[in-house]
Image: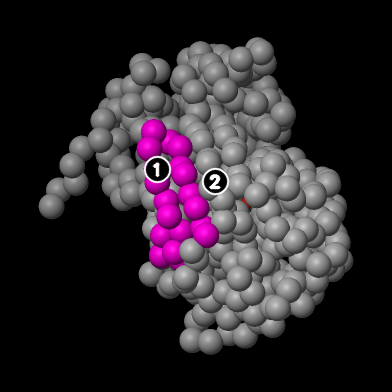
Amino acid sequence: MSASGAKNAALPLMFATLLAPGPHRLGNLPRLRDIRTAEQLLTGLGARVQSENGTLQVTTDALNGKEAPYDLVRTMRASVLVLGPLLARCGRARVSLPGGCAIGARPINLHLKGLEAMGAEITLDHGYVEARAKRLQGARIYLDTPTVGGTENLMMAATLAQGTTVIENAAREPEISDLAVALCGMGARIEGAGSDTIVIEGVDSLGGMDHQVMPDRIEAGTYLIAAALTGGRIKVNNARPEHMEALLSKLEEAGAECSVEEDGILVAGPREILPVNIKTQPHPGFPTDMQAQFMTLMTLCSGSSMITETVFENRFMHVCELQRMGADITIEGHTATIKGVPGLLGAPVMATDLRASACLVLAGLAADNTTEISRIYHLDRGYESLEEKFRSLGADIERVPTAS
Ligand code: EPZ
């Protein structure tokens, strides 16, 4: 089976079309709620958007809006990624502050600090960020934390700035490299994307984008963990090993057999799941977006595992749901200790955020009896037809209409 296009690559790529009139073409888009929200946001800004069979045609020659409204931003925080492109292209932007979300406060102070360093005038008004700049100036920007969205916002803004911008302590996620490839295809001059120092030489204008979104490494990883968890064998055809080294090495440490083939990655689950300790880190460390799914694997390990979440302050909400299924987990600060149990018990559980809902699906696949997961709209934000893909792998899973 194959992973769909990566949500976390597709969203910044869609907003990068604001940097130039186009026409732009973006292929391999996943069919997800967040993608539809991003299309709505582009249309609201005056872009002409046509989407069919996972390919988006966009022209932004008649941008009239400059605002990302609160009702869109609060449903999808990635909307703040219009800030850099709008400021660079139109000289002003008005974006609602995203506010916190289930997994943490999610501030954007580093996005704003970087834009100010590039000469933008930033004011806060009624929960909105007002940003203005005649023309952004290249600057040397140090990011206190390697923020993914901050790196993307600043890299996009810098493509049209006057002079050269250096982003130090930049995030290194593969989605950033994918964005840089697309931007360079539009005529941007970017070096070092994927490393902790990115150098962008501003140009006066950019051409159209023509790009295919990279495969979703988090979705792919979720299926590979499912193989390890159930003792099955799953091959994800378009998974790229260079995007998933941390996960693959931890799956091997847990006793799974991982083989990298030229057209994908195959994982065969072990008879005995060995305990593994995890500490989430910015890429290339173990991804925070895989923490909940890996914890499900550890609930059935033959010992005790410690998982420490260092990226977000509140990303253990799946723990109490797993405990309802018989998992033995205790939390101390940012570290969860998971003592393996012989088996999980099916139960009604509730999804709290995107990756937590994926971990509950995995737990349901491994548990005895039936597990009902409510609030799966969280799941639909980041996984395209998950139940069909799992059914094709032999899972007994179906989507049932919620009781009215
Ligand atoms: C991106 O979020 C992803 N979302 C997240 O995936 C992912 O978990 C996260 O990166 C980390 O890898 C998208 O790409 C759309 P950050 P982002 O800015 O950019 C702090 C999923 O499940 N920070 O790298 O919002 C922040 O509080 C989602 O698909 C500041 O302090 O993450 C957090 O602790 C969830 N100030 C840490 O950095 C800032 O200005 C990492 O946040 C910005 C961030």
Q: Nearer the viewer, mark 2 or mark 1?
A: 2
Question: Which residue is disc 1 drawn over?
Answer: 51
At 46% from the left edge and 59% from the top edge, which residue is drawn? 47
Front residue of 111/225: it is 111
The answer to whether residue 57 is magenta is yes
- Ligand 1 position by quadrant: bottom right
At 62% from the left edge and 85% from the top edge, which residue is drawn? 123
In the rendered structure, are the residues bearing label 2 and label 1 in contact, judged by CB atoms less than 8 Å apart? no
Label 2 – label 1 distance at C-alpha: 12 Å
* Mark sitting on residue 343: none
Q: Which residues are magenta?
A: 43-61
Q: Position of residue 251 (x, y in %)?
A: 64, 26
Query: Residue 121's image quarter?
Result: bottom right
Front residue of 173/364: it is 173
Q: Position of residue 373 (x, y in %)?
A: 31, 42
| 336, above or below 96, in the image | above
Q: Earlier in the sequence, mark 2 or mark 1?
A: 2
The answer to whether residue 110 is magenta is no
Does the image show residue 321? no
At 15% from the left edge and 48% from the top edge, which residue is drawn? 403
Does the image show residue 234? yes
Viewed as shown, does residue 113 lie left or right of 235?
Answer: right
Amino acid carrying label 1: it is: Ser
* Mark sitting on residue 24: 2
| 105, above or below 286, in the image | below
Label 2 packing within 10 angstroms: few (<14), some (14-19), many (20+) = many
Q: Is mark 1 within 8 Å of ligand 1?
A: no
Q: Secondary structure at mark 2?
A: strand
